[in-house]
Amino acid sequence: MPSGVAFSLVAYLLYSCCDAIIKGFGSSLTVFEIAFWTALFSFIPAIFTKPKGEHWRHFHRMRHPWLVNLRSLTGVVGNLCIIYAFTHIPLAEAYSIAFLAPIFVVALSKSFLHEEVTWQRWFFLGASFLGVLLVVRPGFRDLQLGHLLALGAALMGGITTTTLRKVAPVEKRVSLLGLPLGYIVIVNGILMLPTFTWPTWQEFAMLLTIGALGGTGNIIFIAATRRAPVSQIAPAQYSQIAWAVIFGAIFFHEYPDTVAYCGLVVVAFGGILNVMSDETRIRIFSRLSVFGPASAISEVSPPLGDDAKLPRRGEAENQAPAATGK
């Protein structure tokens, strides 16, 4: 196994641990408080992972301020949606629905970026959608608000991903990371005030753990992008479905039935084949995404400096992403 793939698997494991801890809060903290504290603590590792040559004081200097702010706003909404889903429905179900984000990405990319979409990609995306139907089975069981908000998180992920693909080649990383986190901290800081209660020491420890694990996952994932082509790294995100099943069973006594297991397998295989069908697109679960400390599907370019460019079609298979000092 290439070292880059192994590093990415470890990074996704750490991200899954963060999501399991978020689920562990249940209703002890509001979603606004969870989003606020986890985003706030995410600033700590972010400080040490900025690209060389960029400065946090320049985060407001943007070439497409409206698009970057749109990405940040949809990131806030998606962040809240996925946190609510994690704390109210089984982890495996939340992940399976969130993995519908590529469908929205493809649809929006075709509409707004005028990209060509092959029938093979639609087929793989359709397979993933059928897999989600097997997991959730609407009409055969009661859907909860958490299921609908997980779908909302997927939609927000599609919008933020499409926007990111437009601005990533020309915007600074400090803007793409700092502004969304700032939105999450400020918006949730305001929304949590009416019902605010200080977390207990145990809850603070859990929130700090999320920040530490997420920050470590970021560093490991960046190391992975330096050691392997992105086309090899991207499929590793679907290992999170396995971790969702394992953590759900061990810590929350969540046991999918046979049909749901089949659906999860279909979601994973459909998603992996979709990723591998087009080497110029990278779909990753990352704390560098607009969803901040909660998992979200994001499509991003390799780590970018001020003048870096996205790889052309056909280049991604033959070269690893450019390394930065991030």
Image (spheres, grey):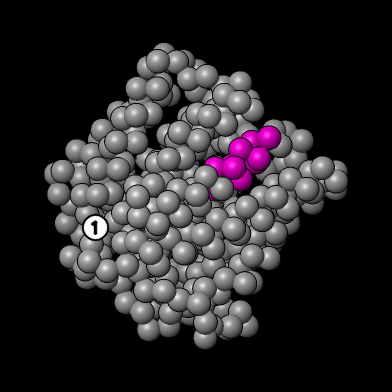
- Occupied quadrant, residue 31: top right
Question: Front-most of 66 and 124?
Answer: 124
Residue 94, horizontal then vertical, whole percent: 50, 34
What amino acid does circle 1 point to?
Glu
Question: Front-most of 161 and 6?
Answer: 6
Question: Front-most of 155 and 131?
Answer: 131
Tell me: residue 169, above or below residue 135: below
Name the residue tied to disc 1. Answer: 279
Residue 311, horizontal then vertical, whole percent: 27, 70
Q: Secondary structure at mark 1?
A: loop
Residue, x 57% and y 24% (percent of image)?
A: 249
Residue, x 50% and y 23% (percent of image)?
A: 143
The magenta stretch is 15-24
Tell me: residue 136, above or below residue 83: above
Residue, x 65% and y 60% (percent of image)?
A: 42
* Residue 24 visible in this rendered orientation of the protein: yes
Question: Front-most of 249 and 226?
Answer: 226
Relative placement, left or right, of 162 versus 202 is left
Q: Residue furthest left?
A: 119
Q: How many numbered discs?
A: 1
Residue 117, horizontal then vertical, whole percent: 18, 52
Tell me: residue 206, above or below residue 174: above
- Occupied quadrant, residue 312: bottom left
* Crowding at mark 1 (Cα within 10 Å: few <14, some 14-19, many 20+): many
Residue 112, horizontal then vertical, whole percent: 28, 60
Residue, x 40% and y 41% (percent of image)?
A: 238
Query: Magenta stretch: residue 56 in it?
Result: no
* Residue 112 visible in this rendered orientation of the protein: no
Please identify the dominant SS of the magenta region: helix
